[in-house]
Image (cartoon, grey):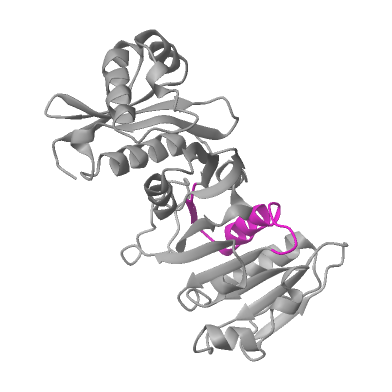
């Protein structure tokens, strides 16, 4: 992406520039049946949309090159409408830059995810969004609704806070869910799983299953069992198959430590949870955004994958 490309939040005062980009972009697309309605946009209609919900305008050398109108009508979700790139800006990173800024806006505004519509007759557009981990949500006629639940990172100063975070994650879980945990030895993967187990109300104790590879903890409250797997000694995805987790996956919450690159095959949807240690100079506590000083700080990054997590209030639940 050129350094000369600027992407800014804009309001109604930039409506003329935005509608110009929309018209040029959609006029360059192949004809559709039924036709796209973008050509019907006027300065007045775009100004009203920008006044209500805002939008983005990408500029290069004082020329408008891209635009997006926001739609804030759905609680917790940011809609992207009229995603437009001037024909002169195609294949120059304009669309990717705008999408990145839109995701930042959604995060800054405390939203959980993003949605948009894509026409199935435009396979290049569909691939563009899929490459950026947007997933088809539903389809009406030729229009595919796609969405993405945003990832999050949270600072965790001590084991108690780790278990508290896990309890919040547990509140979002249901039978069939898969969690893939990654982190160095001693990072806190088992501590996190213990917090899950307690919140799910399963029979304990939850300990590292290293010597048995997999351990099942039945529910004591009528909920799903917790299947706790340690893949540290497994060589590849084929050895995951040998454990026969498919037999319990639909009725359980499955947690796989050291499972990155192997366990994802178990489901079309999963939560990838990475736990990293943050250190400070000897004797100097690490000041953090969470407002707690700790010499044993962890940062937990949670990334949702697949259709199961579309529309789930992940960020608002775990960061609220």
Q: Quadrant of the C terminus?
A: top right
Question: Residue at 41% across / 21% down in the picture?
Answer: 54
44 in the magenta segment: no
Q: On the rendered structure, is 74 left or right of 64?
A: right
Question: Residue drawn at (52%, 78%), measured in percent from left and top?
Answer: 262
Left or right: residue 240 versus residue 5 is: right
Residue shown at 75%/62% (left/top)?
A: 175
In terms of image quadrants, where is residue 176? bottom right
Left or right for 311, reference 5: right
Q: Is residue 13 left or right of residue 133?
A: left
Q: Is residue 89 above or below residue 292?
A: above
Depth check: 279 or 307 in front?
307
Residue 164 drawn in magenta? yes
Q: Position of residue 33 (x, y in %)?
A: 48, 32
Residue 9 seen by the camera: no
Count of marks overlaid on the render? 0
The spot of residue 227 in percent (x, y) is 71, 75
The answer to whether any part of residue 169 appears in the image is yes
Q: Nearer the viewer, residue 191 or 137?
A: 137
Residue at figure coordinates x 45%, y 43% from the top left: 121
Quarter-wise, where is residue 189 in the image? bottom right
The residue nearer to you, when weighing 312 against 290, is: 312
**Extreme residue in the top direction:** 44
Magenta region, residue range = 150-176
Provide residue 285's location: percent of width, then percent of height: 39, 58
């Amino acid at each position: 992406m050129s350094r000369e490309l600027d992407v800014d939040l804009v309001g109604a005062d930039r409506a003329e520039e935005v509608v110009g980009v929309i018209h040029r972009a959609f006029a360059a697309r192949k004809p559709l049946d039924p036709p796209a309605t973008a050509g019907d946009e006027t300065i007045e209609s775009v100004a009203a949309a920008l006044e209500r919900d805002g939008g983005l305008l990408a500029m290069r050398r004082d020329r408008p090159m891209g635009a997006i109108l926001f739609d804030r009508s759905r609680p917790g979700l940011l809609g992207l409408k009229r995603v437009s790139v001037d024909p002169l800006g195609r294949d120059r990173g304009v669309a990717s830059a705008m999408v990145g800024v839109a995701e930042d806006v959604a995060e800054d505004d405390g939203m959980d995810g993003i949605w948009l519509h894509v026409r199935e007759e435009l396979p290049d557009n569909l691939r563009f969004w899929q490459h950026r981990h947007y997933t088809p949500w539903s389809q009406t006629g030729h229009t595919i609704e796609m969405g993405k639940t945003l990832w999050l990172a949270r600072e965790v100063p001590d084991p108690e806070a780790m278990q508290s975070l896990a309890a919040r994650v547990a509140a979002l879980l249901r039978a069939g869910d898969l969690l893939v945990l990654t982190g160095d030895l001693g990072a806190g993967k088992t501590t996190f799983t213990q917090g899950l187990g307690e919140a799910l109300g399963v029979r304990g104790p939850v300990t590292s299953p290293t010597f048995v590879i997999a351990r099942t903890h039945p529910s004591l409250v009528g909920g799903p069992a917790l299947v706790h797997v340690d893949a540290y000694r497994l060589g590849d995805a084929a050895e995951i198959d040998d454990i026969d987790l498919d037999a319990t996956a639909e009725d359980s919450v499955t947690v796989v430590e050291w499972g990155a690159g192997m366990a994802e095959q178990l489901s079309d949807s999963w939560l990838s949870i990475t736990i990293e240690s943050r250190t400070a100079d000897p004797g100097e506590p690490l000041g953090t955004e969470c407002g707690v000083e700790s010499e044993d700080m962890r940062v937990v990054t949670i990334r949702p994958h697949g259709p199961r997590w579309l529309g789930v209030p992940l960020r608002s639940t775990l960061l609220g």
